[in-house]
Amino acid sequence: MAKDKKSKKHASHSKRTKKVDNKQYILGAVVIVVLVAVVAGLLWASYRSGSERVSAQSEGVAAFVDGTPIEIAYIDDQYSRVPEQYKEFVKKSDLLNQTINEFVVIGKAESMGIEVTTEEVEAEVLAAMESSGMSEEDLIERLAEQGLSRDDLVGIYTKQLTINKLLEKDVFSQIDISDEEIEDFYDSRIRAMHVLVETEEEAEEIITDLMRFSLEEIEDGFSDIATASSTDPSAASNGGDLGEFGRGQMVPPFEEAAFSLEEYSFTAEPIQTDFGYHVILKLPKEKSFDEQYDEIKDALLTQKKASAVPDYVAKLRSEADIEILYKEEGSEALV
């Protein structure tokens, strides 16, 4: 069974048994970091020019960062660009916090002399157009629908690339992944198959049926039973194979049983969860440590990067003189 096919099949089962897919979470965290940078970077030029027009008085000012004001009008303008369906989850205080974050991060990049060239920005814009299949005319039209111009897009990419360069130089370059960490990660994961049925009696019958298979036959035999009997929707295509997973990804009773098994052994009794009754078979990993080395190292590096960014931004904020004046309507304190 091909690995790429298995990865797709496992996705449907994760909704039933897994709590969190670590790789998906890791990747999601990195994407969120980039999106925050882009959202906060929107119309940065207008923000900076607007700030210069504000007097030293606090009227109309949402916050001061090292004495420089952030206008309430700017936050209002950004909020007007948030799609209506997201306004239930995104508050003006969130945009203000993002703006402050970007202010201190961009300020740090400027102090370190980090710059982005026009060629680098255009390369990113062209790459985005190519990947989406848009022409220059399509791009201009799509931007106009969002009240943006191509110059606005260039500004967004400029700030995003600046932030990325800063993080690479001042944060990511300090991150290292040791062989011990990679080995610990490899050893902390197991591979298993399962059959899910509605009643304990059905699960007991399956356990009895599995006893007729030899060590060499057990994987194929288990797969056939899962395909024919499991109520897990993915079992029809993956034969009950869950692939590899670590602790914290499965519901507790399932995890406890799976991790207590020896390779090629299955649970002697049905394992009950909120989904029904499981019979679990533990198998050896499909890939050796050496085969997974680079993949694990990349995953751990991505995870450390995602964790390092909030800490770095918090550090920059702690070093800045930030005074927040704005209060959300109906709220005593905002940020």
Image (cartoon, grey):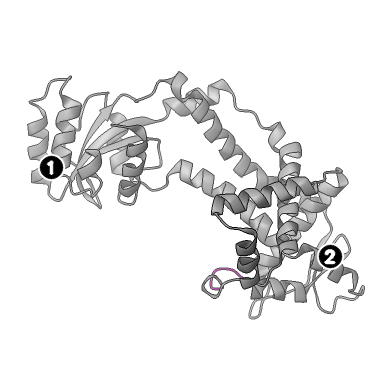
80 and 252: which is toward the camera = 80
* Residue 201 magenta: no
The amino acid type of the residue labelled 2 equals: Arg
Q: Is residue 203 left or right of residue 72?
A: left
Q: Position of residue 64 (x, y in %)?
A: 83, 66
Give the quadrant of the N terminus: top left
Look at the image and tell me whether residue 335 can be seen.
no
Residues marked 2 and 1 touching at CB (< 8 Å): no
Q: Residue at x 69, y 68 (%)?
A: 148
82 and 206: which is toward the camera = 82
Above or below: residue 94 compared with residue 110: below
The amino acid type of the residue labelled 1 equals: Ala
Q: Residues within 10 Å of mark 1 (few under 14, many from 20)?
A: few
Q: Which residues are magenta?
A: 87-91
Q: Position of residue 285 (x, y in %)?
A: 34, 25
Name the residue tied to disc 1: 228
Q: Earlier in the sequence, mark 2 or mark 1?
A: 2
The secondary element bearing badge 2 is classed as helix
Name the residue tied to disc 2: 48
Above or below: residue 273 compared with residue 266: below
Q: Residue at x 66, y 61 (%)?
A: 39
Q: Is residue 46 left or right of residue 302?
A: right
